Amino acid sequence: MSENPTFNAPIGTRDVLGPDSAEWEGLVGLFATLAHRYGFSLILSPLFEDVGVFHRGIGEESEVASKEMYVFEDRAGRRLALRPEGTASVVRAFVQHHPLTPFKAWYITPAFRYERPQAGRYRQHHQVGVEALGTEDPALDVEVISLAARFYDALGLRQVRLLINSMGHDACRASYVALLRDHLALHVEELCDEHRGVWEKNPLRLLDCKKEECVAVTSAGPMLIDHLCDECRDHFTTVREGLKAIGIESEIAPRLVRGFDYYTRTTFEFVSDALGNAQNAVGGGGRYDKLAEQLGGDPTSGIGFGSGVERLLLARAAEGHDAPLLDRTLDVFVVDTTEEEYATVLVDRLRGAGFSVGRAYDHRSMKAQMKVADRSGARYALIVGPRELDAGLVTLRDLRREGEQESVALAQLDQELARRLRR
RNA sequence: GUGGGCGUAGCUCAGUUGGUUAGAGCGCCAGGUUGUGGUCCUGGAGGUCGCGGGUUCGAGACCCGUCGCCCACCCCA
């Protein structure tokens, strides 16, 4: 043991390695493939932004912006923040670069929130998601939700439900908030301790409160979904009909407000019934028709969704899936007991020919190398000792069948492997 | 931010009212089998008992502090 101090990953963060990282690799690959199929292209943007990008976007009063952001100053005194979510950065990039619309981008990114960790919640978690800017066509809402639904399906998730709501646009939301405020004013004393004093600041947030007292008050009051203007109601209806037309069921959730202030019209959340705790949302999103403008751009409507990678993998496990999302099995494992470092050449040649190849190091005994070959999960062992070297052969041993092996001429090796691996 | 549980080997965990050299299983390494993995047998390596202080003749155990992990509330992915 070294006498130097040791370090662990910071609180609320984790390392992903070994078999776990195969799950990640598989999940991300699946998402990338699907996103491409829907016409989205990858966007890379900085992990940190001027703090204003998030304040203006997700709302300074929101839980995430006010209490959970990792804010810091750089050496020149700029106020920066690690991204707590994906959308604001993408919209900032859109405003900065004026790409052709509709602009459709997908991402995989870490997201940071300063919270107490617990099951399914971390200070650094990861999200995959898409954003589409430049049209308010409800067909795009349907597309985005369809992509999410197909993704969950491809992951094997069966116990996922879609909750959907509409936040309306500026005008109809404002008139609704006035109604809600009037209602709340009559019942202030009945609200929960946390909200009794602060309900006026953001009445919509009370719809999200899970406390019995607040639920009792708000559920007796007006619902936004009943007070949409004609256009917003039509938009919402068209989205729901579109979903129905492609076989996606959605439940109207009139209390679904979600955490960010930028949402307008369509908002949705996918929840997993397999996750027993309060952290059951595996993904969510919605329309944000004012956000580009708030970030200094021309008025441009947009919609997107993000999904938590850790949550999705937890949901998969909770549903009992243990089959890996990615097969990392090696094709062959080279066991070399010659003194010639023959493995170096053979391994390189096979990799050049497209096979996945492992080998042992440090000149260990054949027995030790075979053990490593076995543990690697490789399909075949290729044994090269002095006898094979002299005869220009390798011994090809099937590690999945007891004791089956045969000699193969070096010249025929690629062909033979290709045949056996059905390539 | 509030509350509960827990920190002993790489992993999962034992460890008696405080008592001498801290254990098991799995994993790892080597040998049995100087050319063959998955089974078996034998042996081995690996621990400042999270960290710091205190009580005591004596602390893995008791007390205080601290750091960390897990879980719940809140909110979210």
Image (cartoon, coloured by chain):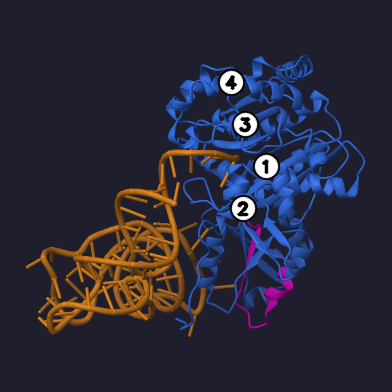
Chain colours: A blue, B orange
Q: In terms of secondary structure, where does tag 2 sit?
A: loop
The residues bearing labels 3 and 1 have C-alpha atoms spaced at a distance of 19 Å
Which residue is disc 1 drawn over? A59
Query: In percent of the image, x 62 and y 57: which residue is there?
Result: A70
- Tell me where the magenta segment starts and ends, as one range: A327-347
- Residue in the foreground of this view, choosing between A340 and A276: A276
Q: Amino acid at mark 2?
A: Met
Q: Which residue is mark 2?
A: A69
Give the number of the mark in front: 3 or 2.
2
The residue wearing badge 4 is: A182
- Is label 3 on the same chain as label 2? yes
Q: Is residue A329 magenta?
A: yes
Ranked by sequence position, the earlier of labels 3 and 1 is 1
Mark 2 vs mark 4: give the one in front.
4
* Label 4 chain ID: A
Q: Are marks 2 and 4 on the same chain?
A: yes
Q: Amino acid at mark 3?
A: Glu
The image position of residue A75, as x and y in percent, is 72, 71
Q: Residue at x 48, y 51 (%)?
A: A116
Looking at marks 4 and 3 on the same chain, the residue that comes earlier in the sequence is marked by 4
> Going from the N terminus, do you reach mark 1 or mark 4 first?
1
Q: Which of the labelled discs sits on residue A269, or is there none?
A: 3
What amino acid is labelled 1 in the image? Gly
Q: Give the Cα separation between the discs numbered 2 and 4.
A: 33 Å
- The Cα atoms of the two marked residues, 1 and 2, are separated by 12 Å
Chain bearing tag 3 is A
Q: Nearer the viewer, mark 3 or mark 1?
A: 1
Which marked residue is nearer to the observer: mark 1 or mark 4? 4
Disc 3 vs disc 2: Cβ atoms closer than 8 Å?
A: no
